Amino acid sequence: MAQVLEFKLPDLGEGLTGAEIVRWLVEVGDVVAVDQPVVEVETAKAMVDVPCPYSGVVTARFGAEGTELPVGAPLLTVAVGGPADDGPAGDTGPAESGDARGRAPATEGSGNVLVGYGTAAAPARRRRVRPPQAPPETSATPTASATPTAPAAPVAPAASAVNGQVRAARSAAARTRAPGAADGPVPVISPLVRRLARQNGLDLREMTGSGPEGLILRADVEYALRAAAARGRTGTAAGEPGPRTDRASVPAPGADFPGVTRVPLKGIRGTVADKLSRSRTEIPDATCWVDADATELMRARAAMNAAGRSKISVIALLARICTAALARFPELNSSVDTGAREIVRYTDVHLGFAAQTDRGLVVPVVRDAHTRDAESLTAEFARLTGAARSGTLTPAELTGGTFTLNNYGVFGVDGSTPIINHPEAAMLGVGRIVPRPWVHQGELAVRQVVQLSLTFDHRVCDGGTAGGFLRYVADCVEQPAVLLRTL
Protein backbone atom coordinates (compact mmCIF):
# COMPACT_ATOMS: atom_id res chain seq x y z
CA MET A 1 0.00 0.00 0.00
CA ALA A 2 1.40 3.40 -0.97
CA GLN A 3 1.64 6.49 1.09
CA VAL A 4 0.94 9.87 -0.52
CA LEU A 5 3.31 12.47 0.87
CA GLU A 6 2.96 16.18 0.40
CA PHE A 7 5.97 18.31 -0.48
CA LYS A 8 5.54 21.96 0.47
CA LEU A 9 7.40 24.99 -0.86
CA PRO A 10 10.39 25.32 1.48
CA ASP A 11 12.00 28.47 2.82
CA LEU A 12 14.49 29.15 0.04
CA GLY A 13 16.49 31.86 1.71
CA GLU A 14 16.74 34.66 4.22
CA GLY A 15 13.65 36.83 4.31
CA LEU A 16 11.82 35.11 1.43
CA THR A 17 8.13 34.51 1.90
CA GLY A 18 7.19 32.99 -1.43
CA ALA A 19 8.17 32.16 -4.99
CA GLU A 20 6.71 32.09 -8.49
CA ILE A 21 6.54 28.85 -10.45
CA VAL A 22 8.56 29.35 -13.64
CA ARG A 23 8.65 25.83 -15.07
CA TRP A 24 7.58 22.40 -13.93
CA LEU A 25 10.29 19.79 -14.46
CA VAL A 26 8.02 16.78 -13.87
CA GLU A 27 4.54 15.70 -14.92
CA VAL A 28 1.84 13.87 -12.99
CA GLY A 29 2.68 10.18 -13.24
CA ASP A 30 6.44 10.70 -13.51
CA VAL A 31 8.72 8.72 -11.22
CA VAL A 32 11.05 10.95 -9.19
CA ALA A 33 14.12 10.17 -7.11
CA VAL A 34 15.25 11.72 -3.85
CA ASP A 35 16.78 15.18 -4.44
CA GLN A 36 15.62 15.26 -8.07
CA PRO A 37 14.70 18.85 -9.11
CA VAL A 38 10.96 18.93 -9.74
CA VAL A 39 10.21 22.63 -10.30
CA GLU A 40 12.04 25.80 -11.22
CA VAL A 41 10.89 28.81 -9.20
CA GLU A 42 11.79 32.46 -9.15
CA THR A 43 12.13 34.10 -5.78
CA ALA A 44 12.60 37.77 -5.16
CA LYS A 45 16.33 37.11 -5.33
CA ALA A 46 17.15 34.31 -7.74
CA MET A 47 16.02 31.42 -9.94
CA VAL A 48 16.14 28.15 -8.00
CA ASP A 49 15.62 24.50 -8.91
CA VAL A 50 13.75 22.88 -6.02
CA PRO A 51 14.58 19.20 -5.33
CA CYS A 52 12.01 16.79 -3.94
CA PRO A 53 12.81 15.01 -0.65
CA TYR A 54 10.84 11.89 -1.62
CA SER A 55 11.13 9.15 -4.23
CA GLY A 56 8.02 7.79 -5.85
CA VAL A 57 5.32 8.68 -8.35
CA VAL A 58 4.04 12.26 -8.72
CA THR A 59 0.30 12.19 -8.09
CA ALA A 60 -0.52 15.90 -8.24
CA ARG A 61 1.04 19.29 -8.87
CA PHE A 62 -0.16 22.49 -7.25
CA GLY A 63 0.02 25.71 -9.21
CA ALA A 64 0.35 26.49 -12.89
CA GLU A 65 3.43 28.13 -14.31
CA GLY A 66 3.33 31.80 -13.39
CA THR A 67 1.50 31.14 -10.11
CA GLU A 68 2.90 32.68 -6.94
CA LEU A 69 2.94 30.40 -3.90
CA PRO A 70 3.74 31.32 -0.30
CA VAL A 71 6.34 29.40 1.67
CA GLY A 72 4.62 26.35 3.18
CA ALA A 73 2.07 25.95 0.39
CA PRO A 74 1.87 22.49 -1.25
CA LEU A 75 4.00 22.04 -4.37
CA LEU A 76 3.21 18.43 -5.25
CA THR A 77 2.28 15.06 -3.80
CA VAL A 78 4.26 11.87 -4.27
CA ALA A 79 3.06 8.28 -3.82
CA VAL A 80 5.85 6.31 -2.21
CA GLY A 81 6.18 2.61 -1.41
CA GLY A 82 3.78 1.26 -4.04
CA PRO A 83 0.57 2.14 -5.87
CA ALA A 84 -1.26 5.17 -4.50
CA ASP A 85 -4.31 3.24 -3.29
CA ASP A 86 -4.33 3.82 0.48
CA GLY A 87 -7.76 5.39 0.48
CA PRO A 88 -11.00 5.09 -1.50
CA ALA A 89 -10.89 5.43 -5.24
CA GLY A 90 -9.87 8.92 -6.25
CA ASP A 91 -8.77 9.81 -2.72
CA THR A 92 -5.08 10.61 -2.64
CA GLY A 93 -5.11 13.24 0.05
CA PRO A 94 -1.64 14.39 1.13
CA ALA A 95 -0.15 13.47 4.47
CA GLU A 96 2.53 15.50 6.19
CA SER A 97 4.28 12.88 8.25
CA GLY A 98 2.62 9.59 7.49
CA ASP A 99 -0.77 8.24 6.43
CA ALA A 100 -3.99 8.07 8.40
CA ARG A 101 -2.84 4.84 10.08
CA GLY A 102 0.09 6.70 11.67
CA ARG A 103 2.86 5.02 9.69
CA ALA A 104 6.13 6.88 9.26
CA PRO A 105 7.03 8.15 5.80
CA ALA A 106 8.51 5.42 3.65
CA THR A 107 11.45 7.53 2.55
CA GLU A 108 13.59 10.33 3.82
CA GLY A 109 15.65 12.96 2.08
CA SER A 110 19.36 12.80 1.65
CA GLY A 111 20.01 15.74 3.90
CA ASN A 112 21.49 17.79 1.07
CA VAL A 113 21.00 21.49 1.57
CA LEU A 114 19.63 23.98 -0.93
CA VAL A 115 19.93 27.58 0.14
CA GLY A 116 19.08 27.01 3.76
CA TYR A 117 16.78 24.01 3.79
CA GLY A 118 17.66 20.35 3.88
CA THR A 119 15.80 17.51 2.24
CA ALA A 120 16.07 15.39 5.36
CA ALA A 121 12.87 14.82 7.28
CA ALA A 122 12.08 17.59 9.73
CA PRO A 123 12.38 16.82 13.45
CA ALA A 124 9.25 15.79 15.25
CA ARG A 125 7.25 18.64 16.72
CA ARG A 126 4.57 18.75 19.33
CA ARG A 127 1.15 18.53 17.85
CA ARG A 128 -0.80 21.74 18.14
CA VAL A 129 -4.55 21.90 18.39
CA ARG A 130 -5.84 24.29 15.79
CA PRO A 131 -9.13 26.14 16.13
CA PRO A 132 -11.88 24.83 13.88
CA GLN A 133 -11.92 26.43 10.47
CA ALA A 134 -14.66 26.82 7.96
CA PRO A 135 -14.26 24.31 5.11
CA PRO A 136 -13.67 25.66 1.62
CA GLU A 137 -16.69 25.84 -0.64
CA THR A 138 -15.19 23.53 -3.22
CA SER A 139 -12.93 20.56 -2.70
CA ALA A 140 -9.43 20.80 -4.09
CA THR A 141 -8.21 17.34 -3.05
CA PRO A 142 -5.73 16.31 -5.72
CA THR A 143 -6.08 13.04 -7.55
CA ALA A 144 -3.67 11.02 -9.60
CA SER A 145 -5.37 12.18 -12.81
CA ALA A 146 -5.83 15.83 -11.97
CA THR A 147 -3.38 18.69 -11.79
CA PRO A 148 -4.81 21.52 -9.68
CA THR A 149 -3.67 25.00 -10.67
CA ALA A 150 -3.57 26.39 -7.15
CA PRO A 151 -3.62 24.96 -3.63
CA ALA A 152 -6.85 25.08 -1.73
CA ALA A 153 -6.64 26.49 1.76
CA PRO A 154 -9.23 26.62 4.53
CA VAL A 155 -10.72 29.98 5.34
CA ALA A 156 -8.37 31.74 7.76
CA PRO A 157 -9.78 32.89 11.12
CA ALA A 158 -9.32 36.53 10.09
CA ALA A 159 -11.24 35.93 6.86
CA SER A 160 -13.97 34.13 8.79
CA ALA A 161 -14.31 37.14 11.07
CA VAL A 162 -14.64 39.45 8.08
CA ASN A 163 -17.23 37.18 6.52
CA GLY A 164 -19.13 37.23 9.79
CA GLN A 165 -19.10 41.00 9.78
CA VAL A 166 -20.36 41.04 6.21
CA ARG A 167 -23.21 38.69 7.07
CA ALA A 168 -24.04 40.83 10.10
CA ALA A 169 -24.04 43.95 7.92
CA ARG A 170 -26.36 42.26 5.44
CA SER A 171 -28.73 41.24 8.23
CA ALA A 172 -28.72 44.70 9.78
CA ALA A 173 -29.32 46.32 6.42
CA ALA A 174 -32.17 43.93 5.71
CA ARG A 175 -33.82 44.76 9.06
CA THR A 176 -33.57 48.53 8.51
CA ARG A 177 -34.34 48.60 4.80
CA ALA A 178 -37.57 50.38 3.96
CA PRO A 179 -40.27 48.27 2.34
CA GLY A 180 -39.85 48.17 -1.39
CA ALA A 181 -36.15 49.04 -1.37
CA ALA A 182 -34.48 47.66 -4.45
CA ASP A 183 -31.64 45.21 -4.87
CA GLY A 184 -31.53 43.88 -1.30
CA PRO A 185 -29.24 44.80 1.60
CA VAL A 186 -25.96 46.68 1.11
CA PRO A 187 -22.88 44.79 2.39
CA VAL A 188 -20.91 47.71 3.84
CA ILE A 189 -19.07 47.65 7.16
CA SER A 190 -17.11 50.90 7.10
CA PRO A 191 -18.89 54.16 7.91
CA LEU A 192 -16.19 55.89 5.88
CA VAL A 193 -17.27 54.03 2.76
CA ARG A 194 -20.91 54.99 3.32
CA ARG A 195 -19.99 58.65 3.87
CA LEU A 196 -17.74 58.74 0.80
CA ALA A 197 -20.51 57.29 -1.35
CA ARG A 198 -23.13 59.63 0.13
CA GLN A 199 -21.00 62.75 -0.40
CA ASN A 200 -20.50 61.83 -4.06
CA GLY A 201 -24.04 60.74 -4.77
CA LEU A 202 -23.27 57.07 -5.32
CA ASP A 203 -25.95 54.46 -4.69
CA LEU A 204 -24.24 51.58 -2.90
CA ARG A 205 -27.16 49.29 -3.75
CA GLU A 206 -26.08 49.47 -7.40
CA MET A 207 -22.49 48.44 -6.69
CA THR A 208 -20.90 45.00 -6.50
CA GLY A 209 -18.15 44.83 -3.92
CA SER A 210 -14.79 43.17 -4.45
CA GLY A 211 -14.30 42.15 -0.81
CA PRO A 212 -15.23 38.89 0.92
CA GLU A 213 -18.85 37.86 0.18
CA GLY A 214 -19.31 40.99 -1.94
CA LEU A 215 -18.21 43.46 0.75
CA ILE A 216 -18.01 46.97 -0.72
CA LEU A 217 -14.61 48.48 -0.01
CA ARG A 218 -13.35 52.02 -0.20
CA ALA A 219 -11.40 51.05 -3.32
CA ASP A 220 -14.69 50.05 -5.00
CA VAL A 221 -16.16 53.49 -4.37
CA GLU A 222 -13.01 55.24 -5.55
CA TYR A 223 -12.93 53.14 -8.73
CA ALA A 224 -16.53 54.10 -9.38
CA LEU A 225 -15.77 57.79 -8.92
CA ARG A 226 -12.79 57.65 -11.25
CA ALA A 227 -14.83 55.79 -13.85
CA ALA A 228 -17.55 58.43 -13.66
CA ALA A 229 -14.99 61.20 -14.03
CA ALA A 230 -13.47 59.44 -17.05
CA ARG A 231 -16.87 59.36 -18.71
CA GLY A 232 -17.28 63.08 -18.11
CA ARG A 233 -19.81 62.70 -15.32
CA THR A 234 -19.59 64.11 -11.81
CA GLY A 235 -21.19 62.98 -8.59
CA THR A 236 -24.60 64.41 -7.73
CA ALA A 237 -25.68 65.99 -4.50
CA ALA A 238 -26.75 63.83 -1.60
CA GLY A 239 -30.30 62.68 -1.94
CA GLU A 240 -30.35 62.83 -5.75
CA PRO A 241 -30.12 59.73 -7.90
CA GLY A 242 -26.48 58.87 -8.48
CA PRO A 243 -24.91 57.30 -11.55
CA ARG A 244 -25.12 53.56 -11.83
CA THR A 245 -21.75 52.17 -10.80
CA ASP A 246 -22.07 48.41 -11.05
CA ARG A 247 -18.63 46.88 -10.54
CA ALA A 248 -18.89 45.17 -13.90
CA SER A 249 -18.93 48.61 -15.60
CA VAL A 250 -16.00 49.95 -13.60
CA PRO A 251 -12.56 49.61 -15.23
CA ALA A 252 -10.56 46.86 -13.59
CA PRO A 253 -7.35 47.65 -11.73
CA GLY A 254 -4.61 48.01 -14.29
CA ALA A 255 -6.83 49.74 -16.83
CA ASP A 256 -8.60 52.58 -14.99
CA PHE A 257 -8.30 54.95 -17.92
CA PRO A 258 -7.09 54.65 -21.48
CA GLY A 259 -3.31 54.61 -21.56
CA VAL A 260 -2.91 53.64 -17.89
CA THR A 261 -1.12 50.42 -16.96
CA ARG A 262 -0.50 49.00 -13.50
CA VAL A 263 2.61 46.92 -12.84
CA PRO A 264 2.44 44.53 -9.85
CA LEU A 265 5.13 45.09 -7.23
CA LYS A 266 6.29 41.50 -7.02
CA GLY A 267 9.42 39.47 -7.50
CA ILE A 268 12.62 41.50 -7.58
CA ARG A 269 10.76 44.78 -8.14
CA GLY A 270 8.63 44.18 -5.05
CA THR A 271 11.63 43.22 -2.94
CA VAL A 272 13.53 46.32 -4.03
CA ALA A 273 10.52 48.48 -3.22
CA ASP A 274 10.12 46.96 0.24
CA LYS A 275 13.81 47.20 1.05
CA LEU A 276 14.19 50.81 -0.11
CA SER A 277 11.04 51.85 1.72
CA ARG A 278 12.29 50.19 4.89
CA SER A 279 15.66 51.89 4.50
CA ARG A 280 14.15 55.34 4.19
CA THR A 281 11.69 54.65 7.01
CA GLU A 282 14.14 53.22 9.55
CA ILE A 283 17.53 54.77 8.74
CA PRO A 284 18.30 58.44 9.46
CA ASP A 285 20.60 58.80 6.49
CA ALA A 286 22.75 61.71 5.37
CA THR A 287 24.80 62.25 2.22
CA CYS A 288 28.09 64.00 1.57
CA TRP A 289 29.96 64.22 -1.71
CA VAL A 290 33.17 65.44 -3.30
CA ASP A 291 34.64 65.83 -6.78
CA ALA A 292 37.95 64.04 -7.32
CA ASP A 293 40.59 64.13 -10.04
CA ALA A 294 40.75 60.52 -11.27
CA THR A 295 43.41 61.15 -13.91
CA GLU A 296 46.18 59.39 -12.00
CA LEU A 297 43.91 56.45 -11.14
CA MET A 298 43.12 55.95 -14.82
CA ARG A 299 46.83 56.14 -15.67
CA ALA A 300 47.63 53.57 -12.99
CA ARG A 301 44.94 51.26 -14.38
CA ALA A 302 46.35 51.62 -17.91
CA ALA A 303 49.81 50.71 -16.60
CA MET A 304 48.43 47.65 -14.77
CA ASN A 305 46.64 46.47 -17.88
CA ALA A 306 49.73 46.93 -20.00
CA ALA A 307 51.89 44.94 -17.59
CA GLY A 308 49.47 42.19 -16.63
CA ARG A 309 47.84 39.26 -18.38
CA SER A 310 44.29 40.29 -17.46
CA LYS A 311 42.47 43.61 -17.53
CA ILE A 312 41.69 45.37 -14.28
CA SER A 313 38.26 47.04 -14.05
CA VAL A 314 37.71 50.50 -12.62
CA ILE A 315 35.16 49.19 -10.14
CA ALA A 316 37.71 46.67 -8.87
CA LEU A 317 40.15 49.50 -8.12
CA LEU A 318 37.41 51.46 -6.38
CA ALA A 319 36.47 48.35 -4.39
CA ARG A 320 40.07 47.96 -3.30
CA ILE A 321 40.09 51.60 -2.17
CA CYS A 322 36.80 51.05 -0.29
CA THR A 323 38.13 48.09 1.68
CA ALA A 324 41.21 50.08 2.66
CA ALA A 325 39.00 53.00 3.74
CA LEU A 326 36.78 50.71 5.81
CA ALA A 327 39.84 49.39 7.62
CA ARG A 328 40.56 52.99 8.68
CA PHE A 329 36.89 53.85 9.39
CA PRO A 330 35.27 50.59 10.63
CA GLU A 331 32.21 52.46 11.92
CA LEU A 332 30.84 52.37 8.37
CA ASN A 333 31.20 48.59 8.02
CA SER A 334 28.33 47.94 10.42
CA SER A 335 24.60 47.73 11.00
CA VAL A 336 22.21 48.72 13.76
CA ASP A 337 20.38 46.16 15.91
CA THR A 338 17.32 48.24 16.75
CA GLY A 339 15.92 45.65 19.16
CA ALA A 340 19.06 45.55 21.28
CA ARG A 341 19.90 49.23 20.59
CA GLU A 342 23.40 48.24 19.57
CA ILE A 343 25.73 49.00 16.67
CA VAL A 344 27.08 45.76 15.19
CA ARG A 345 30.52 46.23 13.60
CA TYR A 346 31.96 43.67 11.21
CA THR A 347 35.60 42.71 10.85
CA ASP A 348 35.18 41.21 7.38
CA VAL A 349 34.06 43.26 4.40
CA HIS A 350 31.41 41.60 2.24
CA LEU A 351 31.08 44.15 -0.53
CA GLY A 352 27.79 44.47 -2.37
CA PHE A 353 27.58 46.22 -5.72
CA ALA A 354 24.54 47.38 -7.64
CA ALA A 355 23.96 45.51 -10.92
CA GLN A 356 21.21 46.46 -13.36
CA THR A 357 19.57 43.51 -15.12
CA ASP A 358 16.55 42.91 -17.33
CA ARG A 359 14.77 41.64 -14.22
CA GLY A 360 15.59 44.74 -12.19
CA LEU A 361 18.26 46.00 -9.83
CA VAL A 362 20.10 43.37 -7.80
CA VAL A 363 23.01 43.66 -5.37
CA PRO A 364 25.39 40.67 -5.58
CA VAL A 365 27.90 40.38 -2.75
CA VAL A 366 31.66 39.84 -3.11
CA ARG A 367 32.61 37.76 -0.07
CA ASP A 368 35.73 38.72 1.88
CA ALA A 369 36.49 41.60 -0.45
CA HIS A 370 39.15 42.86 1.97
CA THR A 371 41.30 39.78 1.26
CA ARG A 372 41.22 40.10 -2.54
CA ASP A 373 43.60 41.93 -4.86
CA ALA A 374 42.56 43.91 -7.93
CA GLU A 375 42.71 40.89 -10.27
CA SER A 376 40.62 38.72 -7.95
CA LEU A 377 38.07 41.50 -7.48
CA THR A 378 37.84 42.03 -11.24
CA ALA A 379 37.18 38.34 -11.83
CA GLU A 380 34.56 38.12 -9.08
CA PHE A 381 32.74 41.23 -10.25
CA ALA A 382 32.60 39.77 -13.77
CA ARG A 383 31.35 36.39 -12.55
CA LEU A 384 28.61 37.83 -10.34
CA THR A 385 27.52 40.34 -13.00
CA GLY A 386 27.17 37.55 -15.56
CA ALA A 387 25.16 35.44 -13.13
CA ALA A 388 22.94 38.43 -12.32
CA ARG A 389 22.14 39.06 -15.97
CA SER A 390 21.42 35.40 -16.63
CA GLY A 391 19.23 35.13 -13.52
CA THR A 392 21.33 32.38 -11.93
CA LEU A 393 22.48 34.16 -8.77
CA THR A 394 21.73 32.17 -5.64
CA PRO A 395 20.13 33.81 -2.61
CA ALA A 396 23.42 33.28 -0.77
CA GLU A 397 25.14 35.49 -3.35
CA LEU A 398 22.58 38.24 -2.79
CA THR A 399 22.62 38.44 1.00
CA GLY A 400 25.02 39.16 3.82
CA GLY A 401 26.59 42.36 2.50
CA THR A 402 28.17 44.81 4.96
CA PHE A 403 28.85 47.75 2.60
CA THR A 404 27.69 48.60 -0.93
CA LEU A 405 29.46 50.22 -3.89
CA ASN A 406 27.12 51.78 -6.45
CA ASN A 407 28.64 52.72 -9.80
CA TYR A 408 25.82 54.77 -11.32
CA GLY A 409 28.31 56.42 -13.67
CA VAL A 410 27.61 53.58 -16.11
CA PHE A 411 24.24 55.27 -16.73
CA GLY A 412 25.96 58.47 -17.82
CA VAL A 413 25.13 60.51 -14.72
CA ASP A 414 27.46 62.50 -12.51
CA GLY A 415 25.88 62.37 -9.06
CA SER A 416 23.23 60.78 -6.91
CA THR A 417 22.08 60.45 -3.31
CA PRO A 418 22.05 56.66 -2.91
CA ILE A 419 19.55 54.93 -0.62
CA ILE A 420 21.33 52.66 1.85
CA ASN A 421 20.94 48.94 1.23
CA HIS A 422 19.19 47.98 4.48
CA PRO A 423 20.44 46.78 6.98
CA GLU A 424 23.87 48.12 6.04
CA ALA A 425 25.10 51.46 7.33
CA ALA A 426 26.62 53.09 4.25
CA MET A 427 26.89 53.14 0.47
CA LEU A 428 29.48 54.79 -1.75
CA GLY A 429 28.18 56.14 -5.05
CA VAL A 430 30.45 56.75 -8.05
CA GLY A 431 29.51 58.98 -11.00
CA ARG A 432 30.90 58.93 -14.51
CA ILE A 433 34.55 59.82 -15.08
CA VAL A 434 34.66 62.61 -17.69
CA PRO A 435 37.13 65.27 -18.88
CA ARG A 436 36.54 68.58 -17.12
CA PRO A 437 38.40 71.83 -16.49
CA TRP A 438 40.39 71.42 -13.28
CA VAL A 439 43.05 73.41 -11.47
CA HIS A 440 46.08 71.12 -11.40
CA GLN A 441 49.36 72.28 -9.86
CA GLY A 442 48.18 75.86 -9.96
CA GLU A 443 47.16 75.83 -13.61
CA LEU A 444 43.92 75.22 -15.42
CA ALA A 445 43.97 71.85 -17.16
CA VAL A 446 41.61 69.23 -18.55
CA ARG A 447 41.48 66.31 -16.11
CA GLN A 448 39.43 63.14 -15.66
CA VAL A 449 37.00 64.10 -12.89
CA VAL A 450 34.55 61.92 -10.93
CA GLN A 451 31.99 62.77 -8.28
CA LEU A 452 31.91 60.51 -5.21
CA SER A 453 28.96 60.48 -2.81
CA LEU A 454 28.59 58.71 0.51
CA THR A 455 25.22 58.04 2.11
CA PHE A 456 25.57 56.88 5.69
CA ASP A 457 23.47 55.96 8.71
CA HIS A 458 23.86 58.88 11.11
CA ARG A 459 23.31 56.51 14.04
CA VAL A 460 26.61 54.71 13.51
CA CYS A 461 28.82 57.79 13.12
CA ASP A 462 28.86 61.55 12.79
CA GLY A 463 29.82 63.73 9.87
CA GLY A 464 33.48 63.79 10.86
CA THR A 465 33.84 60.05 10.37
CA ALA A 466 31.84 60.04 7.15
CA GLY A 467 33.79 62.98 5.80
CA GLY A 468 37.09 61.35 6.76
CA PHE A 469 36.12 58.14 4.94
CA LEU A 470 35.08 60.01 1.80
CA ARG A 471 38.15 62.23 1.84
CA TYR A 472 40.43 59.18 2.13
CA VAL A 473 38.67 57.55 -0.83
CA ALA A 474 39.06 60.74 -2.87
CA ASP A 475 42.75 61.00 -1.94
CA CYS A 476 43.35 57.44 -3.13
CA VAL A 477 41.53 58.19 -6.38
CA GLU A 478 43.62 61.32 -6.94
CA GLN A 479 46.91 59.77 -5.79
CA PRO A 480 46.84 55.97 -5.93
CA ALA A 481 50.20 55.91 -4.19
CA VAL A 482 48.35 56.93 -1.01
CA LEU A 483 46.85 53.45 -0.99
CA LEU A 484 50.29 51.84 -0.85
CA ARG A 485 50.87 53.31 2.60
CA THR A 486 48.05 51.21 4.03
CA LEU A 487 48.77 47.91 2.27
Image (cartoon, grey):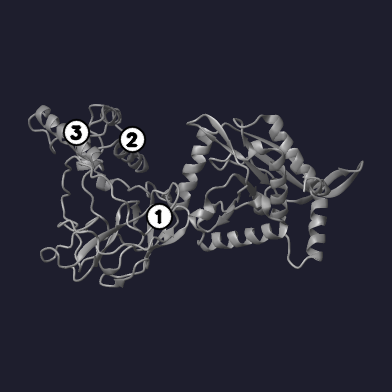
Please tell me which residue lies in front, 260 or 90.
90
Q: Is residue 393 above or below residue 333?
A: below
Query: Above or below — where is 290 with respect to 9?
Result: above
Check disc 3 and report the residue beneath it.
165
Q: Secondary structure at mark 2?
A: loop
Compare marks 1 and 3 and give the one earlier in the sequence. Answer: 1
Q: Earlier in the sequence, mark 3 or mark 2?
A: 3
Q: Earlier in the sequence, mark 2 or mark 1?
A: 1
Query: Which three-letter amino acid code belongs to the residue tagged 1?
Result: Tyr
- For marks 2 and 1, give the CA distance: 56 Å
For image coordinates 32% across by 47% down, the residue present is 251
Q: Residues within 10 Å of mark 1 (few under 14, many from 20)?
A: some
Amino acid, disc 2 = Thr
Q: Which residue is mark 1?
A: 117
Q: Nearer the viewer, residue 289 or 340?
A: 340
Per the model, the C-alpha gap separating discs 3 and 2 is: 32 Å
Most extreme residue toward the right is 442
Q: Which residue is mark 2?
A: 234
Q: Report whether residue 447 is seen.
A: yes
- For the question of whether residue 409 can be seen, the reply is no
Determine the secondary structure under disc 1: strand
Residue 297 drawn at (x, y percent): 80, 52
Identified by mark 3, the residue type is Gln
Q: Position of residue 479 (x, y in %)?
A: 83, 47
Q: Where residue 13 sits in the image (x, y, percent)?
A: 44, 52
Circle 3 sits in a helix, a strand or a loop, which is it? helix
Could you tell me which residue is drawn at 63 percent across and 59 percent down?
380
